């Protein structure tokens, strides 16, 4: 089975020859090849220069042997296109020129021609296809509306969820106005990625797991539903990732993604059971285990395999969160090679 067919079928809960294997943040800081580029260029320059972004996107395919390439970009690039002025500060993470905490700040946002401002992303996708084998899948992505709003409210990576919830509770009209903008632009952006040639898209609503189930239903779910409905209507296979989100499952099952990306805190079999096997499952290897030894990696892979009743239907092997910068490349390669044989 070809890699693209395997990934799409697994995402759509169809039978495959074996589950596809890829890794969140597989294109990045743990690779010496990436670090050599980073020594010459800023993060933003690399993301906005298609030739460099395509090189980074495709590196893990040859180095690790993964079954898909995920676009080298950032969920906050859409915020930069909205006029927030995104900066990646070494040792401090992403920062914006201003925060979005009131109606005036929302009205400052640029909402026109967003995809034109992000045209480098679509050019990167096209360059990746030229570098990769024929019919090799590329995964596109965007942030979930709640998660993107949390960064826009905070102005940097130091997210204060108490303050974010207070903003949503006390200024509900402003919050809804902001989320409506993010939601529509996210839909447009993901559909444009699909037209440019990605096979599957993942929506990283990473920080929605900070909400209670009731608050998720009010502050995040309605906007995620709109995103995934639009993807569904356009026949774009989709993955919905929430870190530490099992408690949200009673509401998440009403968000029409094709697959759920899960972390290591709850077993795959438990997710399958409580979601009534409605979704394909992606995950959920603990990235900390990749910092240890091949023996432990193999042991934990076996446990993961044991928790999947039918790995050839509706399962994608991945981590439960992004690979850590200090992860040895040899361990990553071992993980990918073993995962291909375990299922």
Image (cartoon, rainbow, N blue to C red):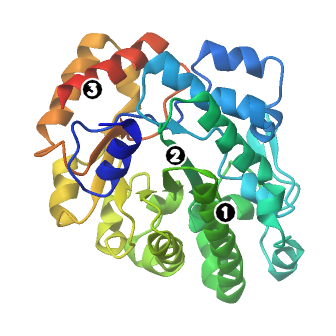
**Relative to 109, does residue 310 appear above or below in the rendering?**
above
What residue sits right under mark 3 in the picture?
Answer: 340
- Which x, y percent locates residue 282? 33, 47
Most extreme residue toward the bottom is 173
Dot 3: few (<14), some (14–19), or many (≥20) neighbours within 10 Å?
some
Kindly state the secondary structure of the residue where label 1 is placed. Answer: helix
Quarter holding residue 114: bottom right
Please state, as top left, top right, bottom left or bottom right, where the C terminus lies in the image. top left
Instruction: Give the SS element for disc 3.
Output: helix
Residue located at (47% from left, 75% from top): 233
Q: Which mark is residue 139?
A: 2
Residue 163 seen anywhere in this rendered image of the structure: no
Spatial separation of the CA atoms under disc 1 and disc 2? 13 Å
Q: Is residue 135 above or below residue 252?
A: above
Q: Is residue 274 left or right of residue 249?
A: left
- Badge 2 element: strand
Quadrant of the rendered image containing residue 25: top right
Residue that numbered label 1 is attached to: 189
């Amino acid at each position: 089975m070809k890699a693209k067919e395997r990934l799409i079928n697994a995402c759509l809960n169809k039978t495959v020859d074996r589950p596809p294997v890829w890794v969140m943040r597989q294109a990045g800081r743990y690779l010496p090849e990436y670090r050599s580029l980073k020594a010459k260029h800023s993060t933003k320059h690399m993301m906005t220069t298609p030739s460099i972004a395509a090189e980074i996107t495709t590196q893990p395919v040859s180095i690790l042997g993964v079954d898909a390439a995920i676009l080298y970009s950032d969920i906050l690039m859409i915020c930069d296109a909205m006029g927030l002025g995104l900066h990646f500060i070494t040792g401090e993470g992403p920062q914006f020129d201003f925060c979005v905490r009131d109606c005036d700040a929302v009205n400052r946002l640029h909402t026109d021609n967003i995809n034109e401002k992000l045209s480098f992303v679509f050019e990167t996708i096209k360059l990746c296809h030229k570098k990769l084998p024929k019919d090799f899948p590329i995964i596109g992505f965007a942030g979930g509306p709640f998660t993107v709003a949390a960064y826009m409210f905070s102005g940097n990576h130091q997210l204060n969820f108490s303050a974010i919830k207070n903003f949503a509770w006390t200024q509900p009209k402003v919050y809804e106005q902001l989320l409506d903008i993010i939601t529509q632009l996210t839909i447009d952006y993901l559909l444009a990625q699909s037209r440019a040639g990605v096979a599957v898209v993942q929506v990283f609503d990473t920080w929605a797991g900070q909400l209670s189930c009731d608050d998720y239903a009010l502050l995040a779910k309605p906007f995620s539903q709109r995103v995934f409905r639009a993807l569904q209507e356009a026949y774009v296979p989709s993955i919905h990732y929430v870190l530490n989100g099992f408690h949200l499952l009673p509401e998440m099952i009403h968000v029409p993604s094709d697959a759920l990306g899960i972390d290591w805190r709850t077993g795959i079999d438990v997710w399958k059971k409580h979601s009534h096997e409605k979704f394909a499952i992606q995950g959920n290897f603990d990235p900390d285990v990749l910092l240890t030894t091949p023996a432990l990696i193999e042991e934990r892979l076996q446990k993961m395999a044991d928790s999947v009743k039918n790995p050839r239907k509706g399962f994608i092997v991945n981590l439960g969160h992004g690979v850590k910068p200090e992860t040895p490349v040899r361990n990553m390669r071992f993980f990918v090679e073993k995962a291909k044989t375990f299922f």
